[in-house]
Image (cartoon, helix red, strand yellow):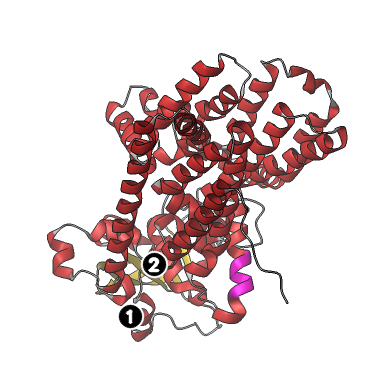
Amino acid sequence: MLARLSLPSDPTLRRVVGLLAISTLARLALAAIVEPGQDEAYAMAVANLDQLSWFDHPPLTFWTVATMRALAAPLFGADVPAFVLRLPFVFAFTATSWALFDLTRRFWGATAGFWALLALTLAPFFLLSAGSWLVPDGPLLLFLALSARTLAILLFETPTPVRARVLWLTLGLTLGGAGLSKYHAVLFAVAALAFVAGGRRRGVLASPWPWAAVAIAAIVVAPVAIWNAENGWVSFLFQAGRGGGAGRPNWIGFAREILGQLAYLGPWTAIAAVLAAACGLRAERRIDGPAAFLVGLAALPIVLFTAVPLLGGAGLPHWQMPGWLFLLPLLGRAIAVAEAEGRVRIVRLARLVAGLAAALLVVAATAVLALRLAPPSPQTVARFGLERPLAEATSWTGLVRALDERGLLARDAAGRPPIVVAFRWTEAARLAEALGPRATVVVFGDDPRGFAFLSDPRTFFGRDVVLIGRPDTFAAALPATRRRFARIEEQPPIRVGLDGAPLVELDVAVGRDLRDPPVPPYPKRP
């Protein structure tokens, strides 16, 4: 007989296993019912296995999407569902959750680990975006959590010399994995080095093994450096310039950063985590204890990216989330201490907040499911001004059928697929997501992002192309585009939307005989 699967005997560990299972099932369900976001559509559009890196981010997310598509193609053909592509990201975040729990458990016990895991599970950003979407945040958080756990064992425990060497080499691999995921990994490395060099553990830097870890991380991220060197360092320049601005404080942007972080985490979690961090530092009264270690890893991304609008730049509130990840163990510690000391009110409040957060998430998931099952009518969309958010949050289903009925997806005499032109990379992402390999999607504009590396518009000289865009984009770009063709034939609009329901209107035209292809702003080509 097969041995029966048994849960751990420790009640807290049983709760942890149960929570991990429930959160994984919840994220699988969300991955099935939530339409791909705009950034996910972009990842699906530009992902391939031929590039060493990408304009926007390091390559790991795009490699993962392309690999999963190739593995699933025998079952699904060219149109692999987003749910299938999301599976590696869902299970990667289960590993992230375990790593965060184990990191917390090693510092303050399993009860603290359970509360940290619960806070992570109920934070909207971690549950949905980092927990299942085709974006770099999920892989980044996995490798950062593993790196922090490994470094904590090296610094706060006493591994044998042989195990310590293995752990240093492992740290190099995980830190390299973070670098292959997102450029945020640099902030983690800087914070970790500052913590080690500034405390009583600085002696470990005299050993060759930490530097071996640095060397391994550099080798792992070498594809990013090679690709950028070959393409004028365009990715580094793009990311470095995203926070730039006029130099004057942008107080509205700063308020958006604050409110965005509260929304992504849940205001109760964000405020409680900050208070818990302060309590943890005060209780330790050390600059090299576990609390200082986690606050050091958290502070740099949170403070730096929150301050971007004060320098006149524009930021996004998810940039700070890797920092918040490392404050959650301190929140778990605070609740565990209150539980051990019999402070019933704090524990009851924590349970109440967790219940309310879970209920809100269930309500939100139910609303999303209702939108899938019963999409709003065009009249409702127009009345409440929902067209733009729906265009950004839903796939453009029905587009293939509409274009095919007009004969616009037919291959030319040479057997080449049609060319579909968008005027914004965001709209190109939706077009490429819907059309798949049926067409070559390009961007005519000064911000083509990753599409610029997939094809060169100058190679389409003399060909007919299909121009598609949202009405406002189309109206702004079409006058300047006319001179590029012998003539442009405008067509009736197409309405596309959620599961074929007509939610979003797209303008369509056919450009005959491309005579003046635009020169892409990057990469440099002969």
Q: Residue shown at 60%/16% (left/top)?
A: 287
> Of label 2 and label 1, which has the lower sequence position?
2
Q: Report x, y in % for residue 17.
A: 56, 54
Using the image as rendered, state which of residue 301 and residue 427 is in the foreground. Answer: 301
Using the image as rendered, state which of residue 145 and residue 115 is in the foreground. Answer: 115
Using the image as rendered, state which of residue 185 and residue 78 is in the foreground. Answer: 185
Magenta span of residues: 67-72
Q: Report which residue position mark 1 lands on.
A: 402
In whole angstroms, how far apart are the C-alphas of marks 2 and 1?
24 Å
Mark yes or no: residue 42 visible: no
Q: Residue shown at 49%/33% (left/top)?
A: 336
Whether tag 2 and tag 1 are in contact, CB under 8 A, the answer is no
Q: Secondary structure at mark 1?
A: helix
From the viewer's perspective, is residue 481 above or below residue 356?
below
Q: Residue shown at 32%/56% (left/top)?
A: 480
Q: Amino acid at mark 1?
A: Ala
Q: Secondary structure at mark 2?
A: helix
